[in-house]
Image (cartoon, helix red, strand yellow):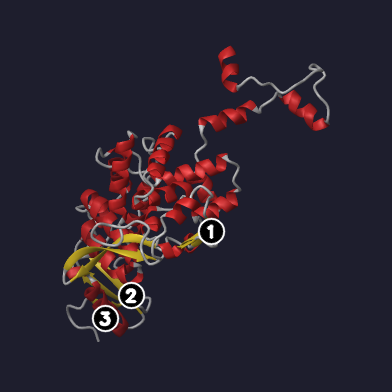
Amino acid sequence: MPKRGENIYKRKDGRWEGRIKGMDFSVNGGKYKSIYGKTYKEVRKKMNEFRKELPHGKNPCILMMKEASEIWLQEKKTEWKATTYRIYRQIVDKYIIPFLGDVKVNRLDYQVLRDFRVRLNDEKDISLSERYQSYICSIVRQILLYTKSKYNPEIQIPEFPVFKNKKNKTMLPSDTALAALENYLLENVEEDTCLGIAIALYMGIRIGELCALTWKDIDLKENVIRIQGNMQRVRETAEGEKKTKVAVLPPKTADSVRTIPIPPLLFPLLKEHQKEENSFVISGKKNGWIDTRTLQYRFERILQKCGIAYFNFHMLRHAFATRCVSMGFDIKSLSEILGHSNVKITMSLYVHPTMQQKKQWMDKLVSYETSLCCMEGHVPYMVPDYQPSNVSSEECLQSL
């Protein structure tokens, strides 16, 4: 039987209801959380379980986002890979807590999230792509969904704003810059850093894949390189302290494990500078390997020596893909060389048509009448001696 003060009673419809007194249990600020069951014992058990699950005895709806984020990270940590946890932790610490940390979970509405998105887009010290901003917002949504399912189904999940970030557009290094970089690398190829960067330039591999590359992965007999690892920085907690370590992990996805033919230009360079199979292609001063951050620093210094404006190491991968398409590569083959799961990723993110390519395609345009007549197997009647024009699109535009 119910005891006085338990706030459990039998309803007219035969069900039992228990009420947990608190503050702000609903979006509208209700003072009670109702729990239902078929019997008195069932309701009492559910109420006890609910109270135990309240973080630090707090009402879930008056949790700040910084508290909800920490609970979500700790609860989900065992379900994720170490790299996934590190990425989520970094996003929470760098973007979610600084901007939304002091906002109550039930006060996150469309306007708050819109302001959050604006701050991500306009912050002077931050340059985030539209895609990455959307990814951050998806993590905010995951935290809210977790809090809702775990503690209170009455928490409302607001609509997330969507708008384009126009200031961040992937800009490829110019052909002149790439040629200058190529010359420097070939002139200094005896340095393993230059040899490694040349591999990335000619084969389009990721920076983490390059750092994890050993001479065992380079098969000069079969004339291929096998991508089997990816070097990453992993954050872990040991004895209450957060530490970051560098580890060689499996590649990004199953499709990233791949075998790439070595281009003829690169083969003699690899053969000449080949080392023991267990050694890394790019070595460090203190260790036998180099992490991605250090390689990025070395790459920046090389750009400075060449007088080239800064661009991220990953742009070598974009430049490789764009160059392959301009040379007539089969897209499916290129997608597999890059380690993409499908050709859509290759075309939408990594291929950037150059102005020269656009001009070449425009030069192929003829009048609608000419096109129609060619399909019917004869030349236009108004142009009996028709020949394809040698005038470039640029000259045509100047004549208008």
Q: Taking 207 as reference, is 395 above or below it?
A: above
Q: Kindly check if marks 3 and 2 are in contact, taking CB atoms under 8 A apart as contact.
A: no
Q: Which residue is mark 2?
A: 36
Mark 1 is on which residue type? Answer: Asn
The residue at the point 53 percent across, 58 percent down is 223
Q: Earlier in the sequence, mark 3 or mark 1?
A: 3
- Using the rendered image of the protein, determine whether residue 258 is visible from the camera's viewpoint: yes
Q: Image point 19% across, 53% down: which residue?
A: 102
Q: Nearer the viewer, residue 131 or 320?
A: 320
Quadrant for residue 40, please give it: bottom left
- At numbered mark 1, what does the secondary structure look like: helix, strand or loop? loop
Task: List x then y, in percent, for residue 300.
Answer: 30, 43
| Label drawn at residue 44 | 3
- Residue ID at (24%, 52%): 94
- Residue 159, x across and y down, in percent: 38, 50
The image position of residue 361, as x and y in percent, is 61, 31
Q: CA distance from mark 3 to mark 1?
A: 70 Å
| Residue 228 seen | no
Figure quadrant of residue 243: bottom left
**Which residue position holds label 1?**
223
- Disc with the residue nearer the chain's start (3 vs 2): 2
- Residue 308 position by quadrant: top left
| Residue found 32% across the figure and 54% down from its top | 292
- Foreground disc of the pair 2, 1: 1
